[in-house]
Image (spheres, grey):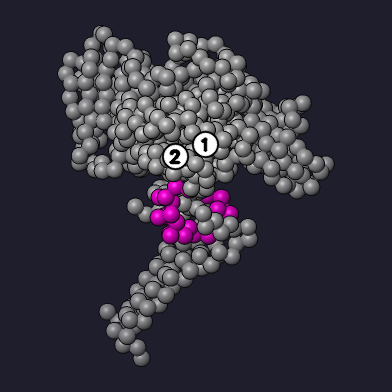
Amino acid sequence: MTSRRQFIKKTSTAAFTLAAIPSALAWALRAAAPGSQANDSAIVVPDADGLILRSYRFRDLETPVEYFNTWLTPVPRFFVRNHMHQPTEFGSDSWKLTIGGEVVKPYTLGLNALAKLKSHTVVNTLECAGNGRSLHRPQVPGVQWGKGAVGTARFSGPRLADVLDRAGIKVSSKHVAFRGADEVPSNVPPFIRSIPIEKALDPDTLIATHMNGAPLNKNHGFPARALVPGWIGAASCKWLTEITVLDKEFVGNFMSPGYRLPNTPVKPGETVKPEDTHSVTSLVVKSVIASPGDGASLKLGKLSIHGAAWAGEDSISRVDVSTDGGTTWSEAELGSDEARYAWRLWKLDWKVAKPGAYTIMSRATDGHLRTQPAQAVWNPSGYLYNAVDQVTVHVS
Amino acid sequence: MSRSTWWKLGSWLLLVIAAVSLAAASPFNVQDDKPTADKLAKPANPANKDAAKTSAPLPDGAMKETATTTCTECHDSGIILQQRLSKAAWTKTVDKMIRWGATVAPKDHDALIDYLSTNFSPDKPPYEPPKTATERATK
């Protein structure tokens, strides 16, 4: 007979052994899986999972397009764009947000006070203005993003309007500037950008503290960031520490020459005078093919083409797909998940009867019937690349 | 408590532990959207954590040392390795970096631009970036 003590001992040993089996099994399965890539060059980055490393220090991570298969992008799969270094020490206790400038009553908020304000949620597709930069010809300097500096998440936090309202904005208010706590080396200008007062007071503009239901992690601006929906990512300043109401647009590197577009299209390679440019604000209509991947080898039969499409502050009215290099187009089915500033997933079933090479294209149209151009408008900084997307596949 | 009650309790406990740990570790229990192939990818080598902190080397050349010291003080070499720019664009970039605090001796200015525009010109093959590990790192 087993004594109670012996039994407990046996039980705990057995439990320990049993508990160890799944992880060992999982490891063995991973190692033995066909097609698994022993990617020894993969680099460990906190809270990032299988992203393309555009830059380690400062941190710029891109989402591979094949992950654009869920309406909400999981946080570890969400692209990261840092202009400079992330703040090294930034505890929830030490963080303070000051609200000042053209206001009656400047004040400072801690994280607890911020958490007490009524929270709102906005599902937003966030895209870096420079997404697709590497596809412009001639190439331009900057992070050479492919197609994946974009993602969609549920952002929550108090409305910026509520925070500004407590300070009492003056009639002279024209712009609201955000300052991020990015660590700035040497003479690099601090990360400060401003948005017009109308957009700042929009009920959907937030001071976001949460992303997909969890507190923001450091890559995404812990403990608080601006969330300016439908606009380029740079408007949604991370590690937010200062909000300043201004009587004009903020003057600084990240407003000009940074993040500006020529007023009229220029010839590729041409330089543009600063006075002939304007600030980049809303994103533009765009679609990306998530699958099949470029260069994929596929088998004859039924295939599915799918991806995502977004249009900043506008909606997506349709997505058309071509499987013959743009000669004929079929309307794709749009996914049921939708929100004002969020992308729509789309898909098209494709029956392939003949082997060969196929050029698949996707072309989105927004609510104002603006559609993706065959060729993106070149500009000196490579912003807002939105040409019709295309991949080539081989079917056998 | 009777011995049989202990047995029952013990067995239940075992089942629960086994079920919970299996659920947590099974690569097939895809509750998020991770693609299966990726889920099954080999775990990252923790040794790379340190390797990642040092930048990939810049190509050989007269200005290799200067470029390495000057540029990688603020950012890693990857951001240089991925550029494909004309000499005019490299000149603008180097001058901007000098304004932002990069220390380039006047005698090295032109040679540095030559080095960058020779090694990272538009006709060079595209840069192949590494990926971040597929396992979530702990803080």
* Direction from residue B135 to residue A177 in the image, left or right: left
Q: Which mark is residue B115?
A: 1
Is residue B55 on the magenta stretch?
yes
Residue at image x 77%, y 40%?
A: A357
Front in this rendered view, residue A316 or A277: A277
For label 2, the SS is helix
Residue at image x 45%, y 56%?
A: B48
Is residue A159 on the magenta stretch?
no
Residue at image x 21%, y 16%?
A: A103
The location of residue A377, given as percent across then percent down, is 59, 20
User: Disc 2, disc 1: CB below 8 Å?
Assistant: yes
Total numbered labels placed on residues in the image: 2
**Neighbour class for label 1 at 10 Å: few (<14), some, many (≥20)?**
some
**Neighbour class for label 2 at 10 Å: few (<14), some, many (≥20)?**
many
The location of residue A5, given as percent across then percent down, is 29, 84
| Residue range corresponding to the magenta coloring | B32-56
Residue at image x 55%, y 42%?
A: A64
Quadrant in the picture for residue A30: bottom right
Q: Which mark is residue A236?
A: none
Kind of residue indicated by mark 1: Tyr
Front in this rendered view, residue B119 or A173: B119
* Magenta stretch, overall SS: loop
Q: Is residue A38 visible?
A: yes
Kind of residue indicated by mark 2: Ala
Q: Label 2, on which residue?
A: B67
